[in-house]
Image (spheres, rainbow, N blue to C red):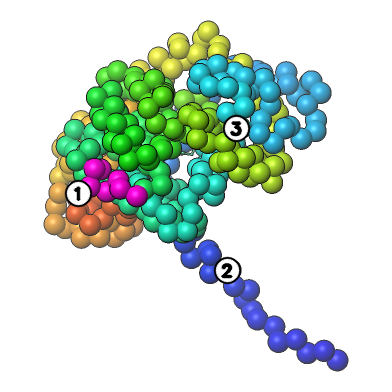
């Protein structure tokens, strides 16, 4: 008889040591508090429908009609033709430069997988949306961080010291978690520097339409013909349809042909994203009622942001006032808290769910946490009453 030496419990691979997503990791602890009967206010995640923002209705209508059409098999790996044509028109590129992805999350994964090799330097903002940190580690790139100035603009002098030898630079605009919106002047200076050092840009435009103050700058216009770049966005934030899991990545400039082939292989490997949301996105992106939808969303966000800022200013907290997206990155200005994780745990016990600043790669110069201001004003007020007790 064969006696196998069994190992229990089974162990995950070493690779898993670098996989993390602090925005959701905190939820397990919050659910434990909730199970004890505590009312929790979740300010950890940027999920508009959770806070009463209805997705752009054209999408669901078109999904329903597409279900009655004959879209039953796999879609083309790189995306539905109609979808790619529509995105190409908006982005002023060719349909063959457009790739459909399962949320920009998959686009970010493909960017690292196809372009950032072992030990290669990728310039990331600090603080940064956590997925970039995790992906850089998984693909064994070297993360190098650039800073922002007091106005929340990219600190070009700081960037200039770090740019040499970088394989690519990531820009998130409007920025998560800072809420910065970069000016045309700032973006032009960054593009000029990148062109000088031949560093292409991965531009994350997830919050493109959600500019609450200032002018919307079209990065594609600023960068076109100056530096090759990739541009990504999705239905998640601008259309409030996080559950659709549909995004797109476009390639601009003439140096990408081999990377595009690599993207194509990655798309092939996962077969396709679903037809219906691609059909719906193609209808939604060019729909005449979209500007009114965005105007309404922005008006709500401004009201909520203003409530958030008013409440936060009563407490020992400092932060750049968010000008875009729907987050604020808060620094705790009291010596009571020395570790962000301890603060976040204490906030959990009070019923407020936040993400520690270290999850965004920021901890060396203070204690930080990120909050969304998506909920209605009275919920934001309730949340601040909770953290007031521990600050
Ligand atoms: C800056 C940024 N990029 C990308 C994503 C991924 O979004 P999705 O996969 O839903 O398109 C998010 C989600 O919060 C984000 O904040």
Mark 3 and mark 2 lie on one chain; the one further toward the N terminus is 2
**Tag 1 residue:** 332
CA gap between label 3 and label 1 equals 41 Å
Q: Check residue 99 in the rendering and tell me which mark sits there, or answer none.
A: 3
Disc 1 versus disc 2: nearer the observer: 2
Instruction: Identify the image quadrant of the N terminus.
Output: bottom right
Q: Which residues are magenta?
A: 159-165
For image coordinates 68% across by 23% down, the residue present is 81
Mark 3 and mark 1 lie on one chain; the one further toward the N terminus is 3
Q: Position of residue 245 (x, y in %)?
A: 59, 35
Asked if the residue at tag 1 contacts the one at tag 3, i.e. Cβ–Cβ closer than 8 Å, the answer is no
Q: Which picture quadrant has residue 338? A: bottom left
Q: Position of residue 171 (x, y in %)?
A: 37, 37
Task: Decide: is 140 above or below 100.
Answer: below
Asked if the residue at tag 2 contacts the one at tag 1, i.e. Cβ–Cβ closer than 8 Å, the answer is no
CA gap between label 3 and label 2 equals 31 Å
- Is residue 213 on the magenta stretch? no
Q: Which picture quadrant has residue 273? A: top right
Label 3 SS: strand
CA gap between label 1 and label 2 equals 37 Å
- Is residue 163 on the magenta stretch? yes
Q: Check residue 13 in the rendering and tell me which mark sits there, or answer none.
A: 2
For image coordinates 57% across by 28% down, the residue present is 97
């Amino acid at each position: 008889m064969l006696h196998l030496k069994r190992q229990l419990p089974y162990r995950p691979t070493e690779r898993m040591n670098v996989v993390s997503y602090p925005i959701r990791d905190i939820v397990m602890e919050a659910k434990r508090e909730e199970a004890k009967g505590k009312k929790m206010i979740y300010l950890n995640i940027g999920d508009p429908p959770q806070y009463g923002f209805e997705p752009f209705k054209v999408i669901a209508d078109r999904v329903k009609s597409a279900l009655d059409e004959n879209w039953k098999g796999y879609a083309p790996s790189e995306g539905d033709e109609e979808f790619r044509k529509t995105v190409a028109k908006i982005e002023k590129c060719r349909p063959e430069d457009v790739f459909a992805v399962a949320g920009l999350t998959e686009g970010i994964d493909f960017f690292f997988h196809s372009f950032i090799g072992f030990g290669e330097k990728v310039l990331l903002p600090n603080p940064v949306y956590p997925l970039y940190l995790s992906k850089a580690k998984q693909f064994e790139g070297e993360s190098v961080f650039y800073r922002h100035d007091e106005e929340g603009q990219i600190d070009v002098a700081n960037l200039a010291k770090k740019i040499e030898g970088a394989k690519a630079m990531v820009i998130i605009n409007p920025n998560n978690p800072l809420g910065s919106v970069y000016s045309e002047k700032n973006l032009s200076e960054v593009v000029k520097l990148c062109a000088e050092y031949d560093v292409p840009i991965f531009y994350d435009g997830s919050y493109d339409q959600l500019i609450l103050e200032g002018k919307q700058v079209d990065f594609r216009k600023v960068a076109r013909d100056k530096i090759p770049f990739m541009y990504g966005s999705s239905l998640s934030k601008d259309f409030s349809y996080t559950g659709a899991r549909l995004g797109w990545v476009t390639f601009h400039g003439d140096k990408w042909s081999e990377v595009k082939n690599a993207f194509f292989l990655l798309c092939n490997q996962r077969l396709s994203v679903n037809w219906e949301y691609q059909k719906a996105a193609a209808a939604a992106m060019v729909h005449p009622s979209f500007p009114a939808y965005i105007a309404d969303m922005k008006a709500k966000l401004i009201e909520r942001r203003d409530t958030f800022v008013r409440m936060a200013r009563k407490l020992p907290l400092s932060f750049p006032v968010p000008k875009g997206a729907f987050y604020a990155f808060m620094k705790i200005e009291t010596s009571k808290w020395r570790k962000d994780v301890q603060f976040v745990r204490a906030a959990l016990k009070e019923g407020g769910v936040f993400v520690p600043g270290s999850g965004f790669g920021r901890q060396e110069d203070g204690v930080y946490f990120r909050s969304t201001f998506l909920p209605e004003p009275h919920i934001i007020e309730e949340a601040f009453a909770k953290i007031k007790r521990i600050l």
